Image (tube, rainbow, N blue to C red):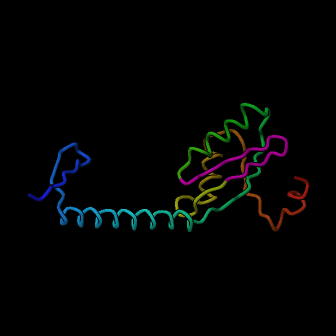
Amino acid sequence: MEKQTTIKSCYGQSSLFNPIFAKQNSEISMKYIVLMLSFMCSMLLAKENTTYLKVDGMKCSYSCSGKVSNIVQNMKGVKKVDVDFEKGIATVKYDDKKTAVKDIVDGLNNKTFYQATELDLEKNKKELSKI
């Protein structure tokens, strides 16, 4: 008499080992691996942009810079915000496929009493060198 091997599926049900079932599992596993690799490649190739905003009107380091940070961080496409209160500059990392610098500046100007403008790196090299 031939010995049959039983395995438990992920749902806790026993089934006889079957080469067709094994083939289906390997196909599913291969599809999963391909999907994961394509997802990881897209994450690696995603372009991240950085812009610098001059924020005028902040009067305190805690709540003013915190407010700027919270408002900008909650905008679609913004990945990270760092606000330097002493220099009055916000460094914003964002996805240019989801938002534009103009949208970030407009959103900050409309939701606060601060005046935000984009720093042009070429025109403001002197100002950025002070930073």
Percent position of residue 86, x then y: 84, 41
Report the magenta residues as a range: 77-92
Horizontal side of 16 relative to 74 (left or right) equals left
Percent position of residue 84, x then y: 79, 44
> Which residue: 27% across, 61% down?
25
- Residue 131 in the image: above or below residue 18: above
Horizontal side of 39 relative to 60 (left or right) equals left
Q: Is residue 79 magenta?
A: yes
Horizontal side of 77 relative to 109 (left or right) equals left
> Farthest front residue?
1
User: Toward the viewer: 28 or 91?
Assistant: 28
Indicate the quadrant where residue 46 lies.
bottom right
> Which residue: 77% across, 58% down?
119
Percent position of residue 54, x then y: 77, 51
Q: Is residue 25 magenta?
A: no
Q: Split into 4 quadrants, where in the image is the N terminus?
A: bottom left
> Which residue: 62% across, 39% down?
70
User: Toward the viewer: 103 or 131?
Assistant: 131
Indicate the quadrant where residue 50 lies.
bottom right
> Which residue: 39% across, 68% down?
34
Question: Which secondary structure dominates the residues rendered in magenta?
Answer: strand
Indicate the quadrant where residue 128 lies.
bottom right
